[in-house]
């Protein structure tokens, strides 16, 4: 089949972001740069392996006195600083750094008196994102082979990835990795660059066609057959379209509908796509034709029309506050809003005011608060065209930074948004009692959760104050999370059950082979040792379903520990981007933080972290599975 590359000619593209407008008090963050995701040096085999989240071609040279193999990765940012890995008698150390913005550097430095034969250095790509550097045995350096420090060897051969090992990804902008069903439609998860997608709707054939130009189809993508009936879809096809030699590849998603209805494609904040039904056409609309009206046929002004808006409505605005709910298990307040809504938050002691400009409230049910609630009072009223919501909280909590999630889409391509405000306790300190963390009941759901303790083996992860290693923390926390989940009837699979070295791809394969419903990777954070003031917990996601999971875990952790919240963020970490199920990566604190490090060393606090993570996962399962 020959598909013409039409580039939006005569086609309709909708590109509104999936997330709503962020409130005035929130700061927008730039898109994450391409990053070094993983590196490991195996001293037994003299082998260095590194992985990036996007394609890269290493620039390699050998420098002398002392001998150093320098590998520069142009266009790659250093995601997380890690202490140098010490070597043996012949290899002094392996380290990573960032000599300039946009370039990450890996260095293998030999001990004094040793060198490499450059002809025996083998550098090859397993894929455009994963590279292996096989080093020869270091040779003693004698006077005959000594080289001046100013000299270097730049023409070391770099072997490109073989065909079929992912090299074709260098030629296309994006890859469709998964089509995930959701309550609002289908979430299309992509990696790589944004693509100018095109959606074509044919009423006569009841067919919706979404084209993704310059995109490859991952072999693992499957049609979500079980979800077609609920959206009135007779058939769905996801195909890699054949094109002429001078054209770029494209992926096509085709829906054959049982009855005609408008559909829309919406680009998310992280570059993925939501494909969803819009308004269902009535029988009259389906049978009628659009006829251009002459001025004589216009509706008289005194009779009005269905599209007219009353003066009262236009004075208040299009945004609506639809409901206010208190979530006792999350110790949080949740507001549901729709339309074009922004907001700001002001604090005066234990009183907080949320102001929603140009917004009105629907019939909101009053809240019934338990006497033990840390939320003492909630009230709302109109202030001219602004809606204000006043909160009073107990003296031992504070209102955290608002977090937003989207619940779907309505007729105007914007759906309801949930604004969640967690009531955060004072941070737990060693030596004080641990708070109670009750576990939600998920009933008899058959759920499989894969837990991924980060790093391990020869890779200790980040190293912080007093030599605290990231792997020490995650190795203690993860098994406790597993035990807590299993007590609630959840099946748990660990990517590693001991302190072994494990590659990123292997972690993903464990989750896929287990047909997991949820994937959670557990880590500890780090920054420069000169910044002990940086502390807090943050959780990352790479999809809409992952965002909901990440928010549940983050809320639970902040409520339980009282640690500073660094928010729920989108990221392109390999293990959460390559897994097909809802996935989150949680950073439980900074091993380099003056406040976090002593807590992370404490066995009681590690149990508290495990309880909070398990509770967050269970809350996600209870509410979304």
Image: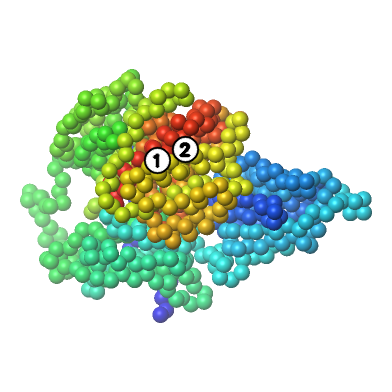
Q: Residue furthest left?
A: 303
Kindly indicate the quadrant of the structure image that contains residue 127. bottom right
> Helix or strand or loop: what does disc 1 sit on?
helix
Tell me the quarter of the image containing the N terminus: bottom left
Element type at marker 2? strand
Judged left or right of residue 294, residue 49 is right
Q: Is residue 155 left or right of residue 400?
A: right
Viewed as shown, does residue 456 lie left or right of 296? right
Task: Give me the residue at 28% from left, 71% from top.
Answer: 235
Q: Earlier in the sequence, mark 1 or mark 2?
A: 2
Q: Position of residue 226 (x, y in %)?
A: 28, 64
* Residue 373, visible in the rendered structure: yes
Give the labeled residue for mark 1.
613
- Percent from the top left, x then y, of residue 264? 30, 60
Residue at (72, 62) in percent of width and height: 122
Image marks 1 and 2: residues in contact by CB distance under 8 Å:
yes
**In front of the other: 418 or 427:** 427
Q: Is residue 407 visible?
A: no
Residue 572 at what x, y percent from top left? 48, 51
- Against 584, is 275 above or below? below
Nearer-the-camera pick, 473 or 130: 473
3D distance between C-alphas at marks 1 and 2: 9 Å
- Residue 217 position in % (x across, y down): 44, 67
Can you tell which of label 1 and label 2 is closer to the viewer? 1
Question: Looking at the rendered structure, which numbered label has been put on residue 588?
Answer: 2
Against 618, is 160 above or below? below
The picture quadrant where one finds residue 344 is top left
Q: Which mark is residue 297?
A: none
Residue in the foreground of this view, choosing between 260 and 546: 546
The residue shown at (66%, 63%) is 124
Query: Within 10 Å of the Cα at label 1, are there few (<14), some (14-19), or many (20+) other Cα atoms?
Result: many
Q: Quadrant of residue 204?
A: bottom left
């Amino acid at each position: 089949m020959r598909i013409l590359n039409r580039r939006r000619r005569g086609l309709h593209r909708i590109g509104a972001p999936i997330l709503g407008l962020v409130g005035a008090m929130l700061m927008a963050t730039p898109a994450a740069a391409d990053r070094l995701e993983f590196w490991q040096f195996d001293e037994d085999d003299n082998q260095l392996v590194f992985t990036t989240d996007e394609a890269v071609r290493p620039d390699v040279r050998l420098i002398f006195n002392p001998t150093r193999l320098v590998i520069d990765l142009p266009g790659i940012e250093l995601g997380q600083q890690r202490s140098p890995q010490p070597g043996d008698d012949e290899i002094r150390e392996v380290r990573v750094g960032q000599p300039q913005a946009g370039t990450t550097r890996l260095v293998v430095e030999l001990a004094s008196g040793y060198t490499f034969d450059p002809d025996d250095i083998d550098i090859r790509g397993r894929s455009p994102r994963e590279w292996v550097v096989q080093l020869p045995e270091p040779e003693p350096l004698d006077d005959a082979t000594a080289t001046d420090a100013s000299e270097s060897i730049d023409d070391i051969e770099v072997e490109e990835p073989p065909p079929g090992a992912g090299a074709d990804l260098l030629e296309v902008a994006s890859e469709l990795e998964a089509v995930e069903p959701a309550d609002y439609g289908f979430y299309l998860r992509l990696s790589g660059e944004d693509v100018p997608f095109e959606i074509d709707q044919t009423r006569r054939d009841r067919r919706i066609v979404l084209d993704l130009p310059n995109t490859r189809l991952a072999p693992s993508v499957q049609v979500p057959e079980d979800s077609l009936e609920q959206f009135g879809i007779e058939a769905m096809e996801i195909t890699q379209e054949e094109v002429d030699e001078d054209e770029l590849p494209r992926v096509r998603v085709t829906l054959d509908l049982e009855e005609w209805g408008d559909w829309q494609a919406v680009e998310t904040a992280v570059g993925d796509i939501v494909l969803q039904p819009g308004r269902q056409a009535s029988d009259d609309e389906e049978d009628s034709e659009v006829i251009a009206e002459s001025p004589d046929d216009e509706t008289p002004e005194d009779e009005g029309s269905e599209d007219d808006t009353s003066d009262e409505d236009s004075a208040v605005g299009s945004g609506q506050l639809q409901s206010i709910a208190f979530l006792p298990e999350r110790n949080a307040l949740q507001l549901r809003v729709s339309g074009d809504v922004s907001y700001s938050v002001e604090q005066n002691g234990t009183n907080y005011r949320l102001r929603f400009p140009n917004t009105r409230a629907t019939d909101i049910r009053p809240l019934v608060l338990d006497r033990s609630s840390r939320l003492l009072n909630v009230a709302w009223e109109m202030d001219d065209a602004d809606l204000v919501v006043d909160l009073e909280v107990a003296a031992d909590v504070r209102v955290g930074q608002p977090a937003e999630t989207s619940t779907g889409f309505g007729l105007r391509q914007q759906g309801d948004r949930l604004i969640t405000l967690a009531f955060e306790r004072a941070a737990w300190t060693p030596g004080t009692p641990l708070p109670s963390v009750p576990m939600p009941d998920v009933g008899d759901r058959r759920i499989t959760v894969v837990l991924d303790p980060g790093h391990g083996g020869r890779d200790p992860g980040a190293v912080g104050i007093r030599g605290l290693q990231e792997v020490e923390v995650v190795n203690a926390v993860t098994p406790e999370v597993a035990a807590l989940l299993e007590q609630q009837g959840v099946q748990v699979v660990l990517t590693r059950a001991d302190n072994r070295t494990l590659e990123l791809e292997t972690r993903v394969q464990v989750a896929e082979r287990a047909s997991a419903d949820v994937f959670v990777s557990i880590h500890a954070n780090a920054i420069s040792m000169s910044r002990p003031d940086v502390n807090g917990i943050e959780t990352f996601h790479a999809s809409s379903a992952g965002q909901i999971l990440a928010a549940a875990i983050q809320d639970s952790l902040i409520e339980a520990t009282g640690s500073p919240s660094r928010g729920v963020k989108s990221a392109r970490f390999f293990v959460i981007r390559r897994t097909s199920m809802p996935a989150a990566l949680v950073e439980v604190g900074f091993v380099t933080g003056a406040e976090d490090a002593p807590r992370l060393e404490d066995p009681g606090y590690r149990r508290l972290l495990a309880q909070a993570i398990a509770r967050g996962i269970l809350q996600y399962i209870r509410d979304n599975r």
